[in-house]
Structure formats: structure tokens, C-alpha cells
Amino acid sequence: MYIIGEKINGMFKKVNQAIKEKNSNFIKELVQQQLEAGADALDVNVGPESTNPLEDMKWLISTIKEVTNVPLAIDTTKPEIMEEGLKLAGEGSFINSTYADDEKLEIYIPLAKKYNAKLIALTISQTGVPQDTSGKMELVSNIIQKCLECEYNIENLYIDPVILPINVSQQNAIAVLEVIQQIKLISNPPPKTLLGLSNISQGTKYRSLIDRTYVTLALAFGLDSAILNPLDSELMNSIITAELLLGKQLYCESFLDAYRKKIELKN
Ligand code: THG
């Protein structure tokens, strides 16, 4: 599974403070830790409390770029900030994210093409977040149709079927799994699937247990990638083991260690 580290997000109090104080060492440390833990890419979000989100996003990206060249997922709802972020982050970045409405897709698909970026599209529209499988799939169809019209490579499209906290909607968690499975049948080549995993356990007890159990289910349904906390080693062990059991990794006696070594070599 392709892992995008979630930690560079102003939603976390300490990160918010580091952004305010322009504490680049704190950010760089968090980058290193996530990469060492196995992240393939990093999500970057200035958080809801930023008073200067454009400047903060530019500062975060430049700070991260001093340490690594892994792809960044630029996590903002503002197209101006997205474009400045894409300029700084370079090719292979992720646009995180667009809604499924035509007006939004008509902004973000051309942006993705211009900067050779991957595009994360949410199954959310101006009318809200469908919590049932068919409502989500309807939005998936619209996203794919627009990408085909605009000649955007579907292999660079990541559909996010939108996880809600399990204490808000149990129905939604089941629908997300069904969508992950059905997306693979909708076009050839199919788009990829992505989740913001930690959403599932927000506000609950046993967060890590809920995260690692749900990701295991999602992998069985065919999930390709997730934004998650790579510093949760039990979560990472569950992912590696689920991939082994699903035949995506070769078995060996020390499969956990072997997988980690491969990650170290890769970075
Ligand atoms: N899809 C896409 N992008 C996303 C999400 C998604 N980006 C943001 C988010 N969801 C994924 N990242 C996080 C990061 C942190 C948390 C959840 C998801 C989290 N934060 C603690 C909380 O809210 O309880 C913060 C607590 C603290 O201050 O320490 O759980 O779904 N495409």
C-alpha cells in the first residue's frame, strides 16, 4: 500500500505551534520520523487556525524540501494555495483534494495536468457527503467522466470515498469498503483508491485498534493508498501483515523485518 504520512498538519497542536513559531527543526524531525517509519509521501496541511495559510503552506513545503524529495500531498481547499504549493513541491505531487462537482473538477483537472500532479478527488459535492454506496458511486462516475473529457490519465486519479468517524456513521464505513471494490470495475484502467484513515476513529476510544482493523478490511477490498499515522507501529505491522496474507508480499520467516529493510533501502 502506498502510505502518505498525515503528521504535517496544523490540526495537531504541536504542529500548529511550530508553524506559528516557524520552528523548522520540529517540522524536519517529523518528516524524518515519518519517512523512517515507512511513509512514501507526506500530507501537508496548515490547519484550521492558520491566519496566513498561503505563507504558512509555502513555508512548510520549503522546510520539508530541505530534508526530502518524496512526493507531497498538498492538503488545502483553496485553489490559489494549491497552485503555489504545486509550484514549490514539484512534479509528482498530489492535489489534495477536489470535490466531485463539475465546477471544481474544471479547476483542478487542468491544474493537475499543468503541474503533472496526481489528483485526489473526494466523493463530496456541493449538496453534501453521500453515505450510501450508490450515492458515492454516482459521484465517482462524474469524476471519471470529467477526467476522460479533459484527457487526464486515470492512473493518476485517486478516488477518496470519504471516511466519517465510526461514531457518526457506521453505514458510511461499510459503503466506503463497497466503493473501494466497485471502483476497480468502473473503467479500464481503473482509478486508484485512497482513504484518510484516522478520520474513522476521531472522537473514539481505542483509536489505534479501530484504525488498524479498518485498514485491514479496506486492504481486503482492494485499497491502494491511505493518509495515515505511520508512527503507529501496530498499525504499520497490521498493514504489512495484511499485505502478506493477501499475497501482495512474499512470505519469509522475518517478514516484518524484511519489509522494513526494503523500506530503508528505498529511501
Ligand atoms: N481525505 C483526504 N485528505 C485528508 C483527509 C481525508 N486530509 C486530512 C485528514 N482527512 C487526514 N489527516 C488526519 C490528521 C489528523 C487526524 C485525522 C486525520 C486526527 N487528529 C487529531 C484529532 O482530531 O483527534 C488531532 C488531535 C491532536 O491535536 O493531537 O485524528 O479523509 N483526501
Image (cartoon, helix red, strand yellow):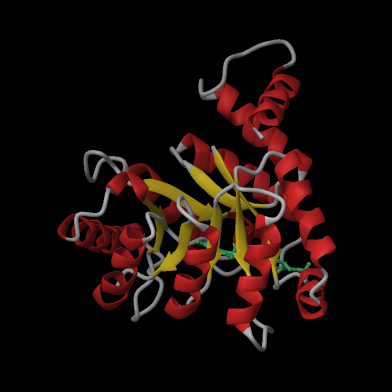
Q: Of 257 and 41, which appears nearest the observer? A: 41
The residue at the far left in this view is: 149
For residue 149, what is the image quadrant?
A: bottom left
Placement of the C terminus among the 4 image quadrants: top right
Give the vertical position of 97 relative to 237 (above or below): below
Measured from the top left, where is residue 176 in percent x and y? 44, 54
Is residue 81 visible in the rendered image? The answer is yes
Measured from the top left, where is residue 46 in percent x and y? 65, 74
Q: Ligand 1 lies in which image quarter?
A: bottom right
The residue at the far top in this view is: 253
Give the vertical position of 48 relative to 25 (above or below): below
Q: Could you tell me which residue is drawn at 58 percent across and 80 percent down?
A: 54
Give the vertical position of 133 relative to 128 (above or below): above
Measured from the top left, where is residue 116 in percent x and y? 37, 54
For residue 221, what is the image quadrant?
A: top left
Q: Of 244 and 59, which appears nearest the observer? A: 59
Give the vertical position of 7 relative to 127 (above or below): above
Placement of the N terminus among the 4 image quadrants: top right
Q: Count the marks: how many?
A: 0
Q: Of 152 and 223, which appears nearest the observer? A: 152
Measured from the top left, where is residue 118 in percent x and y? 41, 53
